[in-house]
Amino acid sequence: MARIVKQCRDIPGKELFQYKDENGDFKAIDSGKVNSYIKNVTGKEFTAKDFRTWAGSLNALLAFKKIGFAETKTASKENIVSALDFVSSQLGNTRTVCKKYYVHPQLIEMYENKSLQSYFNELDRLEKNDDKTGLTCEENILMKILKI
């Protein structure tokens, strides 16, 4: 999907994201407008990047759980690359961009030192969302990990 959006974005003279206002005029939507909307809706100082970072970190957690832990440092580094590849496929960015901007570094560190294991065990015990926070079990675990 990201590839298709990029191809559309590269079409000269067209705004990729736009809407019709009350007068029927087309108005472009840029990142500033998206971030302003997010701020208005949440009442907080959030931006689209915050949501991408949340999604990147959550996808990294899920990938690490699926991959499991490695026995050697070399295998661990390969697993981290695999997890980042998964995140990049979900976000439509490169592995490097995802690692630098969208995956919380604490997750990678905790994977390397295997301190995510207790959280994985907790995920295995949880069956479904408790509907108290509106978050999934995985999101609640990520909040615990990051101590939010």
Image (spheres, grey):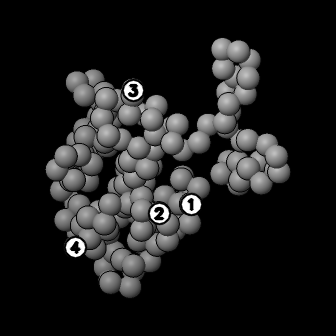
The amino acid type, in three-letter code, at marker 4 is Asn
Q: Sort mark 2 into few (<14), some (14-19) or many (20+) by Cα contacts within 10 Å.
A: many
Of 138 and 5, nearer the camera is 5
Which of disc 1 and disc 3 is earlier in sequence?
3
Residue corresponding to mark 2: 98
Q: Sort mark 4 into few (<14), some (14-19) or many (20+) by Cα contacts within 10 Å.
A: few
Residue corresponding to mark 4: 113
Q: CA distance from mark 4 to mark 3?
A: 38 Å
Q: Secondary structure at mark 4?
A: loop
The amino acid type, in three-letter code, at marker 2 is Cys
**Mark sitting on residue 41:** 3
Quarter of image, res 111? bottom left
Closer to us: mark 2 or mark 3?
3
Q: Secondary structure at mark 1?
A: loop
Closer to us: mark 4 or mark 3?
3
**Mark sitting on residue 102:** none
Closer to us: mark 3 or mark 1?
3
Q: Is residue 83 visible?
A: no
Q: Residue at x 27, y 23 (%)?
A: 131
Q: Sort mark 3 into few (<14), some (14-19) or many (20+) by Cα contacts within 10 Å.
A: few
Which of disc 4 and disc 1 is earlier in sequence?
1
Q: Are marks 2 and 4 in contact (CB under 8 Å)?
A: no
Q: CA distance from mark 2 to mark 1?
A: 6 Å
Which x, y percent locates residue 63? 42, 58
Which of disc 1 and disc 2 is earlier in sequence?
1
Q: CA distance from mark 1 to mark 4?
A: 26 Å
Q: CA distance from mark 2 to mark 3?
A: 26 Å
Q: Sort mark 1 into few (<14), some (14-19) or many (20+) by Cα contacts within 10 Å.
A: some
